[in-house]
Amino acid sequence: MNVPDDLLYTESHEWIRRDGDTIRVGITDHAQAELTDVVYVELPKKGATYDARGTIAVVESVKAASDIYAPAKGTVLEANQALESNPALLNTDPYGEGWIFLLKMDDPNQLSGLKDAAAYRAALG
Amino acid sequence: MSEAAPKTTPLYDEHLRLGGKMIPFGGWLMPVQYSSIMEEHQAVRNNVGVFDISHMGELVARGPGAGAWLDTMLTNNIAKLEVGTGQYTFLLNDNAGIIDDLIVYRIEDEKFLLVVNASRIEDDFGWLRSHLPGSTPAAATGVQIEDQSDQYAGLAIQGPRVGELFSALFGAANKLPARNQIARFDLGGTSLRIARTGYTGEDGIEVFFAAEAAARVWKEVLEKGKSLGMRPCGLGARDTLRLEMCYPLNGSDLSPAHNPLEAGLGFFVDLTKARFSGREKLLREKENGLSRRLVPFRMKGKGPPPRPHYRVFHAGAEVGELTSGTLSPSLNYGIGMAYLTTPAPKPGEEIEIEIRGQKFPAVIEKKPLYKK
């Protein structure tokens, strides 16, 4: 399972790429493999605000809908519109073209309790 | 449904070996998919796929009075059923609620095989046993019924290339049984009952045989199917395939709270028969008019896939909820079925499906949702 070294990870299998007070978020290779066949992504709206751990997006496979959580309180700077026409990007390129949203954090110090790549790999077993 | 640990079929190890993702279903641990629901679905539509249906139940009724008695238990007409033929039918309670939908095969003049849903085996068997004719010993009434579910393994082999697979397994001299017919074949010393039936809308067969031979038959089918593009298929693809055809799923579209007329399956109910459980209630329903109907629909435009229990609106009013819904892999749009209050909107009329608080447009369709 691909777990890039330069990302942070949540217990709920989102990955986070941090750049100052901005984070880019998607789902991990493990998550996409478990879901398989992503057929729809409900994206957050640009400018909308979310609380930490609030449902910010929904990823739907043929079989089930899965909530994606905001890793920190903040405002959506951008959502990946390419997923509207091609939700399978989550399967084919989960860490690249399959990113879901860009969030500006209210308080960058709030981003805590995340795993680094080694810890996430260990959690996957 | 029992709270006990889920049961496994004799093919459990084979599913794990093939990377099957196991989920609980109707009291059983079954593969929902091996690789991808989409790919498995397409394998059945374009080539051929094999499903483990060993979780399904096999009840055997026999004796001189078996046919006449089953005719009073089931909605379809057994008198019309010739030896070697099966028919889709319902087991109803006295209120016409659906205990189960099943296929009954007349495998001998006085011997019937009932293939029932996995989660309903105990209820079906309990109901049938408690309704055996009279209270005298079975020998005196001429009907015996036995639950042989644990003795059987079952495979569904479905797809346009099933004929080629059949020839590869049994040789060109052997012919596939005709639609709805069942016959015996031998595969390396294992006796198989093969029926030309299925739950996918494709040509196909369902195969029943001794549980001990499960892994051997499964492997041989997959081996012979390799060159035909065969895939092992899970419950996920089974659900998308059947929903494209508007075949009902017991426990979702059918339950003791529903009757076959409102499910749109009156074709399998012979109301001209003098007696069967639920008949009086169905006649009253027919006379008074049905209060709801199961109707198929498709989503218009892009949107989230519809799912069971989403609410349905028509002309501003809430008119029912979904019992089935998915993204159709063949059609690439959302499809589903919902029980709607009568008078239900007609094919072509627009409805709305509420998904996470937002309403999405959909249109009522005719059965089946997918045509070749």
Image: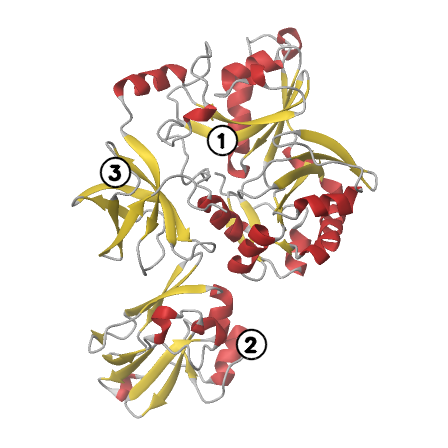
Amino acid type assigned to the residue bearing label 2 in the image? Met
Do marks 2 and 3 both belong to one polypeptide chain?
A: no
**Res B324 quadrant in image:** top left
Amino acid type assigned to the residue bearing label 1 in the image? Asp
Which residue is identified by label 3? Answer: B345
Q: Which mark is residue B101?
A: 1
Distance from Cα at disc 3 to Cα at disc 1: 26 Å
In the rendered image, the vertical position of residue B368 relative to residue A37, given as above or below: above
Q: Residue furthest left?
A: B316
Taking the image as drawn, is residue A112 in sight?
no
Which residue is identified by label 2? Answer: A1
- Residue at 32% x, 75% y is A81
- Residue at 67% x, 49% y is B11
Q: Nearer the viewer, residue B294 or A31?
A: B294
Residue B145 drawn at (x, y percent) = 62, 21
SS label for mark 3 = loop
Residue B244 drawn at (x, y percent) = 45, 46
Q: Nearer the viewer, residue B309 or B317?
A: B317
Amino acid type assigned to the residue bearing label 3 in the image? Pro
Query: In screen coordinates, is B332 left or right of B222?
Result: left
Category of crowding for the residue at label 2, using alpha-carbon neighbours closer than 10 angstroms: few (below 14), some (14–19), many (at least 20): few
Q: Are marks 2 and 1 in contact (CB under 8 Å)?
A: no
Residue B24 drawn at (x, y percent) = 52, 50
**Res A61 quadrant in image:** bottom left
Residue A37 drawn at (x, y percent) = 47, 64
Distance from Cα at disc 2 to Cα at disc 3: 49 Å
Distance from Cα at disc 2 to Cα at disc 1: 43 Å
